[in-house]
């Protein structure tokens, strides 16, 4: 004869306790699922925002996007420009400083084009120049900033590291940049254009601030090279073009910049700020992401 399975009868209290355990287990499982889905959703949203930004920045060269033209946009920028930068950290005539009331010029360029060479000529007494650091030059009443070799075409992880460095620097100076120098070494014109494009396409929104610095110009063998290059580089619509020889002395380079100061080192409104919206350097809108995640979670819970 087959035996019936043994059944244990539970009193009402035991039944309630057992049901609470089951419900608790289900709740914990649901919470873990929600947390896991939230993390996945957050990563997906960040990837979508990054892809969107890259796509928006792949427009044809050299079309200039200049949202600052609208009065509405100008008013918005003015509202952001309230407090001047403190001048209390300046302790020496030239060299590394914290934020001050000088205008900021940033040097950009592919690896090996001569950005650090320019910085060493401007600041010969600085033994160790650091990237993304303000160095003030009293003769020009300007801060100069060196950056890492600009390479956004290689691995995505390395590109993300570089973008983060730029974002942190822009935040440090409150997006206050008055001049942008794109540095390129003298060689075949087509190679120079290729290097310039690799940088310019990410900053073309600020074309009205961009000047081009051509290094290694001692390699030029013709007096016509300077004139021909200026014509060839018109595609980038630079504010000005500066030619620098490899044997230039610090004093000579400063004199060159002084002569072009009215153009290359513009004394724009003291509170000039870059509008990084719709550029690859735009900071993620975490509030917007939070709203999207909440909406997605509500849809899941309500199903």
Image (cartoon, helix red, strand yellow):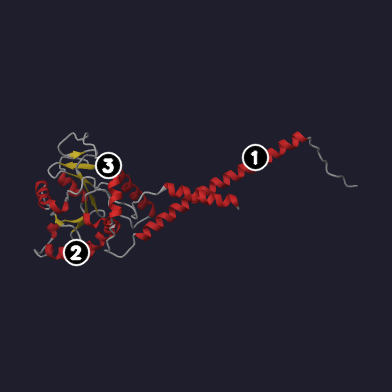
As drawn, 147 above or below 21: below
Q: Identify the disc placed on residue 82.
A: 3
Q: Secondary structure at mark 3?
A: loop
Q: Can you identify the residue that label 2 sits on?
A: 234
Q: Name the residue at 18% across, 59% down.
A: 186
> Is residue 230 visible in the rendered structure shown here?
yes
Marks 2,1: beta carbons within 8 A: no
Looking at the picture, how far across and down is residue 170, in whole percent? 29, 46
Position of residue 293 in the picture relative to residue 21 (left or right): left
Marks 1,3: beta carbons within 8 A: no
Q: Secondary structure at mark 2?
A: helix
* Residue 242 picture quarter: bottom left
Circle 2: is it few (<14), some (14-19), or many (20+) Cα within 10 Å?
A: few
Position of residue 78 in the picture relative to residue 21 (left or right): left
Alpha carbon of mark 2 to alpha carbon of mark 3: how far?
Answer: 36 Å
Q: Can you identify the residue that label 1 sits on?
A: 24
As drawn, 96 above or below 47: above
Circle 3: is it few (<14), some (14-19), or many (20+) Cα within 10 Å?
A: few
Looking at the picture, how far across and down is residue 90, in whole percent? 19, 35
Q: Nearer the viewer, mark 1 or mark 3?
A: 3
Q: Secondary structure at mark 1?
A: helix
Q: Name the residue at 65% across, 39% down.
A: 24
């Amino acid at each position: 004869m087959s035996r019936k399975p043994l059944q244990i009868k539970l009193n009402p209290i035991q039944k309630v306790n057992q049901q609470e355990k089951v419900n608790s287990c289900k709740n914990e499982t649901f919470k873990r699922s929600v947390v896991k889905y939230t993390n996945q959703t957050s990563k997906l949203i960040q990837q979508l925002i990054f892809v969107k930004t890259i796509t928006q920045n792949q427009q044809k060269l050299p079309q200039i996007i200049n949202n600052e033209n609208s009065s509405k946009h100008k008013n918005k920028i003015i509202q952001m420009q309230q407090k001047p930068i403190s001048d209390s950290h300046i302790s020496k005539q030239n060299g590394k400083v914290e934020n001050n009331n000088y205008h900021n010029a940033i040097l950009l360029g592919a690896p090996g084009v001569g950005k650090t060479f320019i910085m060493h000529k401007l600041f010969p007494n600085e033994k160790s120049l650091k990237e993304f650091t303000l160095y003030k030059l009293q003769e020009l009443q300007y801060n100069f900033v060196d950056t890492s070799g600009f390479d956004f075409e290689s691995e995505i992880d390395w590109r993300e590291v570089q973008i983060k460095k730029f974002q942190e620097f822009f935040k440090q100076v409150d997006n206050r940049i008055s001049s942008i120098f794109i540095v390129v070494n003298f060689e075949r014109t087509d190679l120079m254009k290729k290097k310039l494009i690799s940088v310019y396409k990410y900053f073309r929104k600020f074309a009205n601030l961009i000047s081009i610095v051509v290094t290694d110009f001692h390699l030029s063998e013709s007096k016509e090279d300077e004139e021909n290059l200026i014509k060839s580089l018109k595609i980038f619509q630079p504010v000005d073009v500066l030619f620098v020889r490899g044997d230039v002395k610090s004093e000579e380079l400063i004199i060159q910049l002084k002569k072009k100061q009215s153009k290359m080192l513009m004394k724009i409104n003291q509170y000039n700020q870059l509008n990084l919206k719709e550029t690859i350097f735009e900071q993620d809108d975490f509030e917007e992401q939070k709203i999207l995640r909440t909406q997605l979670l509500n849809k899941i819970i309500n199903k």
